[in-house]
Image (cartoon, helix red, strand yellow):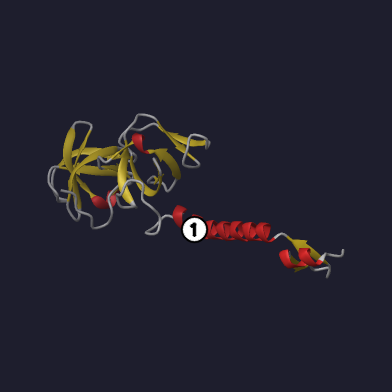
Amino acid sequence: MVLRRDEARSSAFFIGESGYRKPIDPACHSLKENMRRIFTLLSLLLPLALAPGPLAAQSSGQPVPRMVSIKASEANARTGPGVDYPIRWVYHRMDMPVQVIAEFDKWRKIRDWEGDEGWVHFALLSSRRTLIVTAPETTLRRLSAAASPAVARLAQGMVARIELCEPNWCLVTVDGYDGWLDRNDVWGIDPGEVVQ
């Protein structure tokens, strides 16, 4: 290809791998370069925006992780944050304690007491604090002491509403009974956390 003298001044040249020269329009070259830069910048920033942790934008402004409970009698846990994602399983227990481990818009990624995770719409969650019995069986006591008289026996999987928690015991309400549970027998409160 032979370029006229005036074309040579207005065109940039690119030497490809095969060694041939072809004219490149300078306006097109700068547009391509700008698009490449934008794409590179977005590919670097997108993982930071979606990653859980201090760099990710928090949708609610509340700390992550945190404990909440299922508000509805039926809550779909999805594989991703949106109704377009398939339902992984359905929670059928109101007041079931779960831990919010990530947030995206109006969706919360939760973890239950067995370690299963899924995305739930925030409207299906409550800030009400609850516990679930993880021991095969535990005793609800009148006072916060192992020697205190029993109020009721609770089986694994029973859910109780927290009234308050001390370092070793939690005062709860379960099925119309009030009493104290040993924190070692339940899940739904962080170690050392005190609830007033």
> In which quarter of the view is residue 74 placed?
top left
Q: What residue is shown at x 71% (from left), y 59% (from top)? A: 25
Q: Amino acid at mark 1?
A: Leu
List the residue tagged with mark 1: 45
Can you give x and y, in whole percent of width and height, for residue 66 in the image? 31, 50
Can you give x and y, in whole percent of width and height, for residue 113 in the image? 37, 46
Q: On the rendered structure, is 123 left or right of 171?
A: right
Toward the viewer: 3 or 110?
Answer: 3
Give the crowd class for mark 1: few <14, some 14-19, many >=20 residues within 10 Å.
Answer: few
Q: On the rendered structure, is 2 left or right of 98?
A: right
Can you give x and y, in whole percent of width and height, for residue 92 in the image? 39, 31
Q: What residue is shown at x 34% (from left), y 34% (from top)? A: 123
Q: Is residue 100 above or below residue 24?
A: above
Q: Is residue 26 above or below residue 150?
A: below
Q: What residue is shown at x 30% (from left), y 37% (from top)? A: 158
Toward the viewer: 162 or 100?
Answer: 100
Which residue in the rendered view is the most extreme toward the right?
A: 1
> In which quarter of the view is residue 106 placed?
top left
Number of labelled discs?
A: 1
- Mark 1 lies on a secondary structure that is helix
Q: On the rendered structure, is 120 left or right of 142?
A: right
Q: What residue is shown at x 18% (from left), y 34% (from top)? A: 177
Q: Is residue 54 above or below residue 58?
A: below
Q: On the rendered structure, is 168 left or right of 110?
A: left
Can you give x and y, in whole percent of width and height, for residue 13 in the image? 75, 67
Toward the viewer: 127 or 142?
Answer: 127
Image quadrant where one finds the N terminus = bottom right
